[in-house]
Image (cartoon, grey):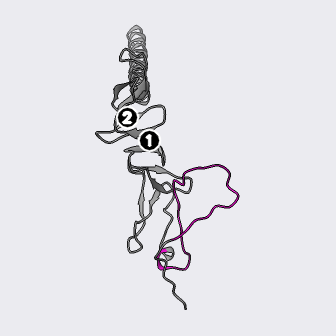
Amino acid sequence: VSTQSTGGTWRLTIEGARGTGELTHFELLLHGTEFTRKKLVCEEGKFAILPTNTSEDVVCVERCPSERFYSVNRRCIPCHGSCFTCLEYNYCTSCPEPLFLDYETHTCIEECPKGYSVTSSRLSGKICQLGTEDSTSWYKGDTLYIIVVVVFIVALILMVLLISAHHYKKHLAREARWIQISAKRTENHML
C-alpha cells in the first residue's frame, strides 16, 4: 500500500474555457483516503456540512446554517466571507453589521455609492438602493417578510372559520336532536 501526501499547492487548470469567471466552490475528494472512507452523505431529508479538516466527521443537519447555502448534492456550502446569508456563493441576501447589501449586485459593501439611499429590512438588514430617501420601493427587502405575515394571517382566519363552522354544525345537530326528543315527548303525551 502506497501513501502519498495531499499537502502542498494544487493548481486547477480549466481547458477550453471562454471568458473570465470566478470559481466559487471546489471540492477535491481523494478516494481511498481515510477521509473518503467516512460517511460523506447524510440520510434522506438532511444536508451535510463537510469538515474543514480530515480528523472531523461530517455533520448532518435538517437546515443549513445562515452562512451557508444549499447545493444540489445535499451539502451546505459556505457563503462568500462578506455575506451573512446567501442563495449562492456570491449572491448575498443579508450582510453582517456594519456592511450594506447592494440590492442590485447582491454583494455586501462598506458604504453605499453616491446616488443610492439606505433602507432597512428585517430580513436583509441595511440595503443600498438606487434612488432617493422618498423611494416608493421601501418594501423591496421585506417582500418575503410581508408574504410570511400575510400567509400567517390568512391561515389564522381560515382556522377560525373552520372552528366556527365545526361548532355551528354541532349546534345544529344538538338542535335537531332536541326537536326529535320534543316531538317524541309530545307524541307520547298524546297517546
Whether label 1 touches label 2, CB < 8 Å: no
In front here: 66 or 74?
66
The answer to whether residue 27 is magenta is yes
Counting labels gives 2
Give the percent coordinates (x, y) of residue 74.
Answer: 52, 56
Kindly give the residue lying farthest to the top in the view shown.
Answer: 190
Give the percent coordinates (x, y) of residue 19.
Answer: 65, 49
Kindly give the residue lying farthest to the bottom in the view shown.
Answer: 1
Mark 2 sits on what residue?
124
Task: Give the residues drawn in magenta, as a range.
Answer: 10-35
Q: Amino acid at mark 1?
A: Cys
- Is residue 152 among what the camera can see? no
Give the percent coordinates (x, y) of residue 101.
Answer: 39, 35
Report helix, strand or loop for mark 1. Answer: strand
Q: Which mark is residue 92?
A: 1
In front here: 42 or 106?
106
Kindly give the residue lying farthest to the front in the view shown.
Answer: 114
Q: Residue at x 48, y 82 (%)?
A: 5
- Is residue 52 among what the camera can see? yes
Figure quadrant of the N terminus: bottom right
Q: Up-down: is 135 above or below 72?
A: above
Q: Amino acid at mark 2?
A: Ser
Q: CA distance from mark 1 to mark 2?
A: 9 Å
The answer to whether residue 48 is magenta is no
Give the percent coordinates (x, y) of residue 99.
Answer: 33, 39
Mark 1 crowd level (few <14, some 14–19, many ≥20, 10 Å Cα) = many
